[in-house]
Amino acid sequence: MIIGIASGKGGTGKTTVAVNLAWCAPQPVLLLDCDVEEPNCHLFFDSKLQHCERVCIPVPALDASKCNACGLCSRICEFHAVAFMGQTPLLFPELCHGCGGCTLVCPAGALKEVGFEIGVVEVSDAGSCTLVQGRLHVGKALSPPLIRAVKHFAVADHLTIVDSPPGTACPLSAALSGCDYAVLVAEPTRFGLNDLGLVLESVRQLGIPAGVVINRAGERSDLARVFCREKGVRVLAEIPESERVARECARGRIAAQTMPEIRRSFDELWAAVLAAVPPRAARTGGSNHARQ
Amino acid sequence: MKVLVSSSGQAMHSKLDPRFGRAEFFAVVDTETGQFEVVRNDQGREAAQGAGIQAAELAARLGVKVVITGHCGPKAWSALSAAGIAVVSGAQGTVAQAVDDYKKGLLKAASAPDVKGHWA
């Protein structure tokens, strides 16, 4: 069972929910940190690095002696990673999305694909939790291939939690595609609910069933409950607003471990999620957004 | 010799657009005959990335020898250099003034990009 944690808006508590869920899990879990621009699940665990691998995307390399200056490579590139300047193609690997189009259309065999490292995947042992995180190299802009490399570690018949990046674009769909269920973390503010609406549209397009957890719940929670009712999405659990939770988080501690009332919220969340996840065979698709 | 000026309008008296890749228009001026042509930069303005590279390709296709603009980033710079196109950055005022200043030798070709990408 693969459960994705998403939010649309940043800073609503995705990582807090992901690490607390992992801690409260009824059985050993795989925790995949797909927020590869800023992975921070590791801050909450005393973990031991077991394995690290480099992740590369295929980018073109030019054999100038074979180039017939036809310019097709530049014309097919949507991302301006190949510029055709007079007689020479000029390559910008940092703009390349690794689609392979230029190599395919080159009639002279002047382009071949070489690996361009964009980041690493690190696997750590954190006791009852195995943590897999992607780390995008500084200066690299293309995260979906790295997110997919982290996702390769997901195991459908094992409990897997995916901490997604914020937003609703390609990185999110790379993180959520293949998930059985999405837990959407929302804060009860107008800004938070606006972005909850956006991420809800995204998961519906991906064909992934979803429920909402209201984080920092309190006086304003009615705003979120009404919003969820109108949108036809279930509220799975509420995590009460508390300065102590914020303190625990800031110290890299899992609040459910030290605060019984928070533990209760997450037990409730687990029960709701396990009851809500449809059996795998019943899933109706979830389009494959493998490539951008 | 043909020079290209990044422009915010379609006339010689239009204000120069300080951005190269994301300028609204490109004014192509023949410094000998004064002949003047305007090219819209819709593709570059709407590009998610690589606007400068795309503009440089366009400049090469138009056969210009010099690009006169406000600022030029590193990718546009390498593309223009590869095509042997000189870059004059730091130009201001109208398209006509920029071309005049260049003809009078008041504007010199730059020897390096003057901004990082996505500066504007």
Image (cartoon, coloured by chain):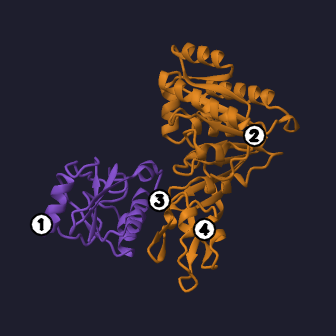
Asked whether B73 or B96 is in front, the reply is B96
Picture colour for chain A = orange
Query: Which numbered disc, 3 or 4, marks the residue that appears first in the sequence?
Result: 4
Locate residue A115: give its quadrant: bottom right
Q: CA distance from mark 4 to mark 1?
A: 42 Å
Specify which label sits upstream in the sequence, 4 or 2.
Answer: 4
Image location (x, y in percent) of residue A13: 55, 34
Q: Are marks 4 and 1 in contact (CB under 8 Å)?
A: no
Q: Amino acid at mark 3?
A: Val
On residue B106, which mark appears? 1
Find numbered disc 2 in the image and state the secondary structure of the residue it sits on. loop
Of A126 and A85, nearer the camera is A85
Residue A202 at what x, y percent from top left?
64, 35
Specify the amino acid type for callout 1.
Leu
Colour for chain B in the figure: purple
Which residue position is annotated with label 3? Answer: A138
Task: Residue under label 2, please give it.
Answer: A286
- Residue, disc 4: A102
Q: Nearer the viewer, residue A121 or B103?
A: B103
Q: Residue furthest right?
A: A281
B40 to the left or right of A161: left
Seen at 47% across and 59% down, the residue is A138
Report crowding for label 3: few under 14, some 14 to 19, many 20 or more residues within 10 A (C-alpha): few
Q: Secondary structure at mark 4?
A: helix
Residue A44 at x, y percent in the picture = 58, 44
Question: Pointer 3 indicates a residue of which chain?
Answer: A
The answer for which chain carries disc 4 is A
Q: Is residue B47 visible?
A: yes
Mark 3 and mark 4 on one chain: yes
